[in-house]
Amino acid sequence: MKKPSRNEIRKPTKTLAGVTPVAVIIEPRKCRHGTCLFCPTLDVPQSYTPKSPAIMRARLLDYNPYRQVEARIKAYQVMHHPTDKIELIIMGGTFLDYPIKYRYDFIKACYDALNNKISSSLEQAKTLNEKAKHRCVALCIETRPDVCGDSEIRRMLEFGCTRVELGVQMPDNGIYNICKRGHTVQDVIDSTKGLREAGFKIGYHIMPGIPGSNKKKDLHLFKLIFSNENYKPDQLKLYPCQVIKGAELESLYYKRKYLPYTEKELKELLIKLIFLTPRYCRIMRIMREIPPDYLVAGTTHIDLRKDIEQELRKNNSDIKEIRFREVGMKSRYQDIDNKNLELKITQYKASGGEEYFLETVNKEDILFALCRLHISNGKAIVRELHVYGQALNIGKREKKATQHQGLGKKLLQEAENIARKNKIKKLKIISGVGVRPYYKKLGYKLDKQKVYMEKEMR
């Protein structure tokens, strides 16, 4: 890679959402339930291929979590990205199904790398990270709906996890049986409810074109996800089904028992799904990066999202999903009015409770900051507080930047007002370890279990 010039940020979209994402890959291990129909088995972490960029980096480092975090931070620094606010993303399989010691050692090693110091325990590593140069402001773990019960949720809270991505694919028991998923729709409902009540941000992996479905059914099930209060995720990854070498689906494709969508069919369907996505949900990604060497059938157009969004912008389409509206992404295509900002609140029912989605937007509905508040059974928890725009190092201010301008503080004050109106006595916040000092300045303190930040509502 050619070294960037002094003031150039290479690959700027990497940190336009306000944080610096660091993906860390776990070592290969077969899933306990078996292998899904569409999932390749290629001596690398389940569902990945040996030439996937993240896998290639991890293999070079023997899947060592410390070395992976260290290497990614150095790479970001070379590209002139800020590395103060790190979002750790644990990828590569069902991490919560791995041996308990492996999980604790893995998470601790990630914190140790951020701290540039080996700690004697996970708790010490987390405490050190509160004041470290590279702070973990968010931690994401991917898991299956059937490996996300009370015990797994407790451990994730102990790890400092704030976001969980569930492999939902499409919520239909018939599809799950065909694809050998090994879990049920009820598992999806139960895990979603448990995660929401614990304060996690919830992401779903959705797979259009999955065996057992069709375009009409995909559309129906996608509508169900946002109309039925048992679901309503905060984030999505849309991964259309592709036929990959080493998957059982490859054999069905050659026998003409399965055909993936054509690029035209897929594009038309994805546009419909984007229009159906509500304003409280962010489509994080569309398409997986499957290297052509391993792709048997399915579109090879990795940049399909870019083409779709260019078309939607050209037509001035009224898209509500978060990524399409967020200020960092919008600033790439137009000048932004950042002076006339207003508060917008969307209230909806989810998992037996009330959700309040608070936004700071301008007159064009461009999103600057958001807050998610969940209230149920007399308890309230802030599940996310996020300011968008180019990530800035902690304490740094820039005149035209959206971060560090007090937008998060104002949204949190609104969440507190809502909690008081609902006669909530104590407001909790699920917080990345590295964000704890910020909340302490706003009057919050770490609870006795050392999990949530909390504040008495007076």
Image (cartoon, rainbow, N blue to C red):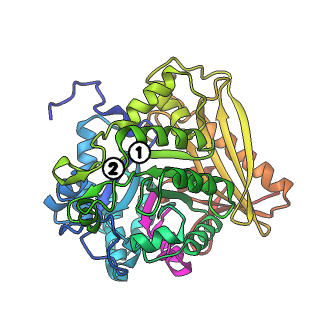
Residue 11, position as x, y percentages in the image: 30, 33
Question: In the structure shown, which secondary structural element does the residue marked by tag 2 occupy?
Answer: loop
Residue 75, position as x, y percentages in the image: 23, 44
Left or right placement of residue 398 versus residue 247 in this view: right
- Front one among 16 and 237: 237
Question: In the structure shown, which secondary structural element does the residue marked by tag 1 occupy?
Answer: strand
Residue occupying the point 55% across, 20% down = 336
Q: Name the residue tied to disc 2.
A: 288
Q: Is residue 109 above or below residue 295?
A: below
Which amino acid does the dot numbered 2 rest on? Arg
Which amino acid does the dot numbered 1 rest on? Ile
Look at the image and give the residue range highlighted in magenta. 139-162
Left or right placement of residue 264 versus residue 376 in this view: left
| Residue density around tag 1, few if under 14, some if 14–19, many if 20 or more, within 10 Å | some
Residue 440 can be seen in this image: no
Q: Is residue 405 above or below residue 339?
A: below
In the rendered view of the protein, which quadrant contains the C terminus? bottom right
Left or right placement of residue 331 versus residue 256 in this view: right
In the rendered structure, find residue 286 and report the number of the disc placed on it. 1
| Residue density around tag 2, few if under 14, some if 14–19, many if 20 or more, within 10 Å | some
Residue 381, position as x, y percentages in the image: 68, 60
